[in-house]
Image: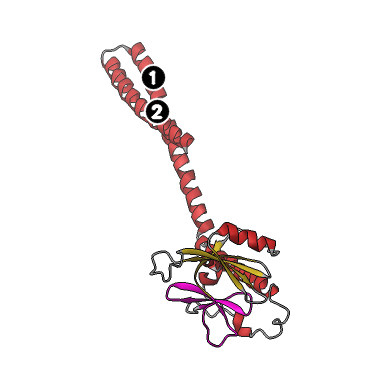
Amino acid sequence: MVSLSIFFAFSLIGIIIGGLATLVTLIFTILALVAGKNENAAYWAIGFAISISVVIFSVVQMAERVSNKVKSGVEWLKEHENTSFTTEDDQLDYSRSERDNLMDTLKLFVDNRYKNVIPFSFYQDKGLDSDTLPFIYPYAFEYKDYNFNLVNVLQKNSIPMVGHISQLAYDNQYLLLKVDKTNMELKNNEPEISYFLIDLKSGKQTQFLNSKKLIEEASAMGYKGNTEMMYISDLYQAWFATNYD
Protein backbone atom coordinates (compact mmCIF):
# COMPACT_ATOMS: atom_id res chain seq x y z
CA MET A 1 0.00 0.00 0.00
CA VAL A 2 2.86 2.39 0.84
CA SER A 3 4.79 1.52 -2.32
CA LEU A 4 1.62 2.00 -4.36
CA SER A 5 1.09 5.47 -2.89
CA ILE A 6 4.70 6.43 -3.62
CA PHE A 7 4.32 5.21 -7.20
CA PHE A 8 1.23 7.36 -7.76
CA ALA A 9 2.97 10.35 -6.17
CA PHE A 10 5.95 10.06 -8.53
CA SER A 11 3.67 9.52 -11.52
CA LEU A 12 1.65 12.59 -10.61
CA ILE A 13 4.81 14.66 -10.13
CA GLY A 14 6.06 13.45 -13.51
CA ILE A 15 2.81 14.50 -15.17
CA ILE A 16 2.82 17.96 -13.52
CA ILE A 17 6.50 18.78 -14.08
CA GLY A 18 6.47 17.22 -17.54
CA GLY A 19 3.35 19.19 -18.42
CA LEU A 20 4.89 22.49 -17.30
CA ALA A 21 8.15 21.73 -19.11
CA THR A 22 6.19 20.83 -22.25
CA LEU A 23 4.33 24.14 -22.15
CA VAL A 24 7.48 26.19 -21.50
CA THR A 25 9.55 24.49 -24.21
CA LEU A 26 6.69 24.84 -26.70
CA ILE A 27 6.43 28.57 -26.02
CA PHE A 28 10.20 29.14 -26.33
CA THR A 29 10.33 27.04 -29.49
CA ILE A 30 7.67 29.21 -31.10
CA LEU A 31 9.37 32.44 -29.94
CA ALA A 32 12.74 31.26 -31.29
CA LEU A 33 11.20 30.41 -34.65
CA VAL A 34 9.46 33.80 -34.82
CA ALA A 35 12.74 35.54 -34.01
CA GLY A 36 14.49 33.55 -36.71
CA LYS A 37 16.78 31.78 -34.26
CA ASN A 38 16.45 28.34 -35.79
CA GLU A 39 19.33 26.82 -33.79
CA ASN A 40 17.79 27.85 -30.47
CA ALA A 41 14.41 26.67 -31.71
CA ALA A 42 15.92 23.24 -32.39
CA TYR A 43 17.21 22.98 -28.81
CA TRP A 44 13.85 24.01 -27.40
CA ALA A 45 12.13 21.52 -29.71
CA ILE A 46 14.31 18.73 -28.31
CA GLY A 47 13.34 19.82 -24.77
CA PHE A 48 9.71 19.85 -25.85
CA ALA A 49 9.99 16.30 -27.19
CA ILE A 50 11.63 15.09 -23.98
CA SER A 51 9.03 16.83 -21.78
CA ILE A 52 6.04 15.48 -23.65
CA SER A 53 7.63 12.00 -23.57
CA VAL A 54 7.86 12.22 -19.78
CA VAL A 55 4.18 13.22 -19.58
CA ILE A 56 3.08 10.39 -21.89
CA PHE A 57 5.20 7.84 -20.00
CA SER A 58 3.83 8.94 -16.61
CA VAL A 59 0.22 8.86 -17.85
CA VAL A 60 0.65 5.41 -19.40
CA GLN A 61 2.26 4.00 -16.26
CA MET A 62 -0.46 5.40 -14.00
CA ALA A 63 -3.23 4.15 -16.30
CA GLU A 64 -1.66 0.69 -16.41
CA ARG A 65 -1.34 0.50 -12.62
CA VAL A 66 -4.93 1.69 -12.12
CA SER A 67 -6.13 -0.86 -14.66
CA ASN A 68 -4.31 -3.66 -12.84
CA LYS A 69 -5.77 -2.59 -9.49
CA VAL A 70 -9.28 -2.53 -10.92
CA LYS A 71 -8.76 -5.94 -12.47
CA SER A 72 -7.43 -7.33 -9.17
CA GLY A 73 -10.41 -5.85 -7.34
CA VAL A 74 -12.89 -7.46 -9.73
CA GLU A 75 -11.15 -10.83 -9.38
CA TRP A 76 -11.19 -10.51 -5.58
CA LEU A 77 -14.93 -9.75 -5.59
CA LYS A 78 -15.64 -12.76 -7.78
CA GLU A 79 -13.47 -14.93 -5.58
CA HIS A 80 -15.19 -13.83 -2.35
CA GLU A 81 -18.76 -13.28 -3.51
CA ASN A 82 -19.92 -16.37 -1.61
CA THR A 83 -17.64 -15.91 1.40
CA SER A 84 -20.45 -14.80 3.73
CA PHE A 85 -22.44 -17.93 3.00
CA THR A 86 -19.39 -20.15 3.43
CA THR A 87 -18.54 -18.52 6.75
CA GLU A 88 -22.11 -18.94 7.99
CA ASP A 89 -22.12 -22.61 6.98
CA ASP A 90 -18.74 -23.17 8.61
CA GLN A 91 -19.97 -21.55 11.83
CA LEU A 92 -23.06 -23.76 11.82
CA ASP A 93 -20.92 -26.87 11.31
CA TYR A 94 -18.57 -25.77 14.10
CA SER A 95 -21.45 -25.15 16.52
CA ARG A 96 -22.99 -28.50 15.68
CA SER A 97 -19.64 -30.22 16.20
CA GLU A 98 -19.07 -28.48 19.55
CA ARG A 99 -22.57 -29.39 20.72
CA ASP A 100 -22.09 -33.04 19.73
CA ASN A 101 -18.74 -33.17 21.51
CA LEU A 102 -20.32 -31.82 24.70
CA MET A 103 -23.21 -34.27 24.54
CA ASP A 104 -20.82 -37.18 23.90
CA THR A 105 -18.78 -36.21 26.97
CA LEU A 106 -21.87 -35.92 29.16
CA LYS A 107 -23.15 -39.31 27.97
CA LEU A 108 -19.75 -40.88 28.61
CA PHE A 109 -19.84 -39.73 32.25
CA VAL A 110 -23.26 -41.22 33.00
CA ASP A 111 -23.31 -43.85 35.77
CA ASN A 112 -23.68 -47.35 34.35
CA ARG A 113 -26.94 -47.89 36.23
CA TYR A 114 -28.59 -45.17 34.14
CA LYS A 115 -27.08 -45.74 30.69
CA ASN A 116 -29.83 -48.04 29.46
CA VAL A 117 -32.72 -46.01 30.83
CA ILE A 118 -31.94 -42.49 29.57
CA PRO A 119 -34.91 -41.14 27.59
CA PHE A 120 -33.99 -40.26 24.01
CA SER A 121 -35.44 -36.80 24.50
CA PHE A 122 -33.07 -35.97 27.38
CA TYR A 123 -30.11 -35.15 25.12
CA GLN A 124 -32.22 -33.98 22.20
CA ASP A 125 -31.95 -30.28 21.40
CA LYS A 126 -35.42 -28.80 21.83
CA GLY A 127 -34.41 -25.44 20.38
CA LEU A 128 -33.89 -22.04 21.88
CA ASP A 129 -37.22 -22.11 23.68
CA SER A 130 -36.16 -24.97 25.93
CA ASP A 131 -35.64 -24.07 29.60
CA THR A 132 -33.68 -27.23 30.45
CA LEU A 133 -30.04 -27.97 29.64
CA PRO A 134 -29.09 -31.66 29.84
CA PHE A 135 -26.15 -32.51 32.06
CA ILE A 136 -24.86 -35.87 33.28
CA TYR A 137 -28.07 -37.89 33.58
CA PRO A 138 -30.18 -37.68 35.71
CA TYR A 139 -28.98 -34.13 36.40
CA ALA A 140 -29.90 -31.09 34.33
CA PHE A 141 -29.75 -27.32 34.57
CA GLU A 142 -33.09 -25.60 34.65
CA TYR A 143 -33.20 -22.00 33.46
CA LYS A 144 -35.89 -20.20 35.40
CA ASP A 145 -36.40 -16.56 36.39
CA TYR A 146 -33.05 -15.66 34.80
CA ASN A 147 -31.22 -18.20 36.96
CA PHE A 148 -29.65 -21.61 36.41
CA ASN A 149 -30.67 -24.27 38.91
CA LEU A 150 -29.41 -27.82 39.27
CA VAL A 151 -32.23 -30.38 39.24
CA ASN A 152 -32.57 -34.15 39.29
CA VAL A 153 -35.07 -35.09 36.57
CA LEU A 154 -35.93 -38.32 38.39
CA GLN A 155 -37.39 -36.34 41.26
CA LYS A 156 -41.00 -35.56 40.44
CA ASN A 157 -41.18 -32.49 42.66
CA SER A 158 -38.45 -30.76 40.54
CA ILE A 159 -37.16 -28.88 43.57
CA PRO A 160 -33.75 -27.44 42.65
CA MET A 161 -30.84 -29.05 44.44
CA VAL A 162 -28.80 -25.84 44.07
CA GLY A 163 -30.00 -22.52 42.68
CA HIS A 164 -28.48 -19.34 41.23
CA ILE A 165 -25.53 -21.17 39.66
CA SER A 166 -23.08 -19.06 37.69
CA GLN A 167 -20.05 -21.31 37.12
CA LEU A 168 -19.16 -24.98 37.17
CA ALA A 169 -16.48 -27.61 36.68
CA TYR A 170 -16.93 -31.39 36.64
CA ASP A 171 -15.61 -34.85 36.00
CA ASN A 172 -17.41 -38.21 35.86
CA GLN A 173 -18.07 -38.25 39.62
CA TYR A 174 -18.14 -34.73 41.03
CA LEU A 175 -19.68 -31.40 40.11
CA LEU A 176 -18.22 -28.14 41.41
CA LEU A 177 -20.54 -25.15 41.46
CA LYS A 178 -20.27 -21.45 42.18
CA VAL A 179 -23.46 -19.79 43.40
CA ASP A 180 -23.84 -16.05 42.96
CA LYS A 181 -26.64 -14.24 44.80
CA THR A 182 -25.20 -10.76 44.40
CA ASN A 183 -27.85 -8.01 44.36
CA MET A 184 -30.45 -10.40 45.74
CA GLU A 185 -32.40 -10.26 48.95
CA LEU A 186 -30.63 -12.73 51.22
CA LYS A 187 -32.18 -14.71 54.06
CA ASN A 188 -30.72 -15.97 57.33
CA ASN A 189 -27.34 -14.31 56.73
CA GLU A 190 -26.66 -16.51 53.72
CA PRO A 191 -23.55 -15.50 51.72
CA GLU A 192 -23.71 -13.72 48.39
CA ILE A 193 -21.08 -16.05 46.95
CA SER A 194 -20.79 -19.70 47.90
CA TYR A 195 -19.55 -22.98 46.44
CA PHE A 196 -20.96 -26.50 46.31
CA LEU A 197 -19.44 -29.92 45.79
CA ILE A 198 -21.96 -32.39 44.40
CA ASP A 199 -21.33 -36.15 44.43
CA LEU A 200 -22.97 -37.21 41.17
CA LYS A 201 -23.20 -40.84 42.32
CA SER A 202 -25.03 -40.24 45.59
CA GLY A 203 -26.40 -36.73 45.14
CA LYS A 204 -24.72 -35.60 48.35
CA GLN A 205 -23.86 -31.90 48.39
CA THR A 206 -21.42 -29.95 50.54
CA GLN A 207 -21.30 -26.18 50.77
CA PHE A 208 -18.15 -24.04 51.05
CA LEU A 209 -17.62 -20.32 51.53
CA ASN A 210 -14.58 -20.05 49.26
CA SER A 211 -13.22 -21.77 46.19
CA LYS A 212 -9.95 -22.80 47.85
CA LYS A 213 -11.71 -25.03 50.38
CA LEU A 214 -13.90 -26.43 47.62
CA ILE A 215 -10.90 -27.41 45.47
CA GLU A 216 -9.03 -28.87 48.41
CA GLU A 217 -11.96 -31.06 49.44
CA ALA A 218 -12.74 -32.11 45.88
CA SER A 219 -9.10 -33.07 45.22
CA ALA A 220 -8.95 -35.03 48.48
CA MET A 221 -12.02 -36.99 47.38
CA GLY A 222 -10.47 -37.86 44.03
CA TYR A 223 -11.75 -35.13 41.72
CA LYS A 224 -9.78 -35.25 38.44
CA GLY A 225 -11.49 -32.52 36.40
CA ASN A 226 -10.57 -28.93 35.64
CA THR A 227 -10.29 -26.79 38.77
CA GLU A 228 -10.91 -23.59 36.82
CA MET A 229 -14.65 -23.08 36.60
CA MET A 230 -16.46 -21.83 33.52
CA TYR A 231 -19.78 -20.08 33.06
CA ILE A 232 -22.74 -22.28 32.18
CA SER A 233 -23.52 -20.00 29.25
CA ASP A 234 -20.00 -20.66 27.89
CA LEU A 235 -20.25 -24.42 28.36
CA TYR A 236 -23.55 -24.49 26.43
CA GLN A 237 -22.63 -21.79 23.93
CA ALA A 238 -22.93 -24.15 20.95
CA TRP A 239 -26.28 -25.39 22.31
CA PHE A 240 -27.66 -21.86 22.21
CA ALA A 241 -25.96 -20.94 18.91
CA THR A 242 -28.75 -22.22 16.67
CA ASN A 243 -31.61 -24.66 16.37
CA TYR A 244 -30.81 -28.06 14.93
CA ASP A 245 -32.94 -30.45 12.95
Q: Position of residue 204 (x, y in %)?
A: 62, 74
Q: Does any portion of residue 226 appear in the rendered image?
A: no
Residue 177 lies in the magenta stretch: no
In this view, the residue in front, 238 or 47, is 238
Above or below: residue 94 compared with residue 33: below
Magenta-colored span: 132-161
Instruction: Tell me which residue sits at (60%, 74%) in the image.
Output: 135
Q: Quadrant of the C terminus?
A: bottom right
Q: How many marks?
A: 2
Residue 14 is labelled as 2
> Quick one: which residue is furthest to the front in this view?
188
- Residue at 29%, 16% (x, y): give it: 33
Q: In the rendered image, which quarter is residue 36 located in?
A: top left
Looking at numbered disc 1 in the image, what kind of residue is underneath it?
Gly
Identity of the residue drawn at 48% across and 50% down: 73
Residue 10 in picture, x, y percent from top left? 42, 29
Depth check: 115 or 113 in front?
113
In which image quadrant can residue 59 be found? top left
Q: Quadrant of residue 145?
A: bottom left
What amino acid is found at the position of numbered circle 2 in the picture?
Answer: Gly
Q: Is residue 125 left or right of residue 112?
A: left
Question: How far apart, in angstroms, are the residues tagged by discs 2 and 1?
Answer: 15 Å
Who's the residue at 46% across and 72% down the image?
Answer: 147
- Give the labeled residue for mark 1: 47
